[in-house]
Image (spheres, rainbow, N blue to C red):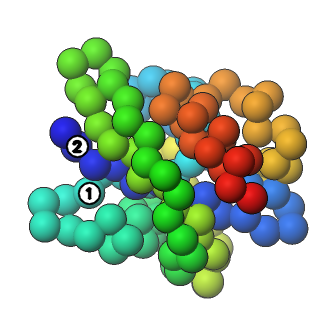
Amino acid sequence: MNQVTCAILMDEKGVLVTRRSQLMPHPLKWEFPGGKVKEGEKPELCIRREIREELSIEISVERMLPSVFHGYGSDSFELIPFVCRHLEGVIELAEHSEFRWVPLEELDQLDWLDADVEVVRILKENL
């Protein structure tokens, strides 16, 4: 089973969400940014690396939320959400088509990837 991390970045504008591009699997779905944990890599280091690669910013990891276990077809994975803080840099998208800062109470209105729907629920329960 693959491990995948995602970052929940929050500030006074809301929660940062990213939209998958037309070229990515599950195009135009919204998700929390992140990516696959490499062999031997700790999830906390993975999320920092992935956010640097995808968004060109530096973050700190504040805490981990409960994992979500999900499958798309024959591919199953553990999605590990981290509440993070933006340290420095300006967001520049490398893969996604757009990003938004969405108020917590409006997160349910987005067309999410299936696994991220559960992360939204966990986030709301843990704030």
Going 60% across and 32% down the picture, which residue do you hit? 117
Quarter holding the N terminus is top left
Going 76% across and 31% down the picture, which residue do you hit? 108
Q: Amino acid at mark 1?
A: Val
Q: Nearer the viewer, residue 58 or 5?
A: 5
Residue 89 lies, in percent from the top left, at 60, 79
First in sequence, mark 1 or 2: give its number. 2
Q: Which residue is mark 1?
A: 37
Q: Which residue is mark 2?
A: 2
Seen from this angle, which residue lies furthest bottom? 88
Relative to 104, is 31 on the left or the right?
A: left
Residue density around tag 1, few if under 14, some if 14–19, many if 20 or more, within 10 Å: many
Q: Amino acid at mark 2?
A: Asn
Going 81% across and 48% down the picture, which residue do you hit? 104
Q: Disc 1 and disc 2: Cα gap in Å?
A: 8 Å
Vertical comparison of 107 with 124: above or below: above
The answer to which image quadrant residue 34 occupies is bottom left
Q: Secondary structure at mark 1?
A: loop
Residue 98 visible (yes or no): no
